[in-house]
Image (spheres, rainbow, N blue to C red):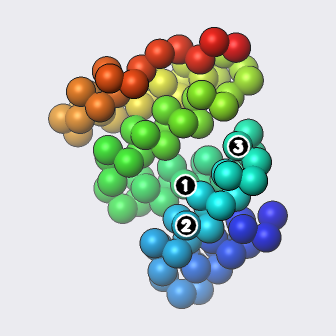
Amino acid sequence: DLWMRAAAWYRERLSDLPKSEQALHKAIELDPEYEPAHEARVSLLRGEGRHRDMVGALFGWAERESDRLVAVERLTEAAVIAETAGTLHVFQRSAACPSR
């Protein structure tokens, strides 16, 4: 929760998106299944138009998702973004449905 608050502070009060992303990364490291951290990271990347990074973030989120249907939704979103952003090769190299 501390890293999430730090991420929000950096993003909203200081407009320091790189620091916000670092704090979100720390939150995910501490609890890889913490959905709000993944959601905030994808939102930040979406806002910056960082499609390649967003595909990677969605894939990482899907890998940690315990609900197989939700994981498929994340992977589908990643594939659509990759295709429209011209980064489909990134998704194809790493795409495999989580084995949960």
The tag on residue 22 is 2
Query: In the displayed structure, would residue 49 be above or below residue 18?
Result: above
Q: Nearer the viewer, mark 1 or mark 3?
A: 3
Residue closer to the observer: 64 or 51: 64
Q: Quadrant of residue 61?
A: top right
Q: Nearer the viewer, residue 90 or 51?
A: 90
- Cα separation between marks 3 and 2: 14 Å
Measured as percent of width and height from the top left, residue 88 is found at 25, 28
- Other-residue count near label 2 (Cα within 10 Å), few / some / many at <14 / 14–19 / ≥20: some
Left or right relative to 62: residue 5: right
Question: Disc 2 or 1, which lies upstream in sequence?
Answer: 2
Position of the C terminus, as image quadrant, is: top right
In the structure shown, which secondary structural element does the residue marked by tag 1 occupy? helix
Image quadrant containing the N terminus: bottom right
Around disc 1, counting alpha carbons within 10 Å, would you say few (fewer than 14), some (14 to 19), or many (20 or more)?
many
Q: Give the mark count.
A: 3
Q: Which residue is mark 3?
A: 32
Residue 84 coordinates in the image, percent (x, y): 23, 33
Looking at the image, is 44 positioned above or below residue 7?
A: above
The residue singled out by tag 1 in the image is: 41
**Residue at horizontal 31 percent and vertical 21 percent from the top:** 92
User: In percent of the image, x 41 and y 45: which residue is there?
Assistant: 54
Q: Are marks 3 and 2 in contact (CB under 8 Å)?
A: no
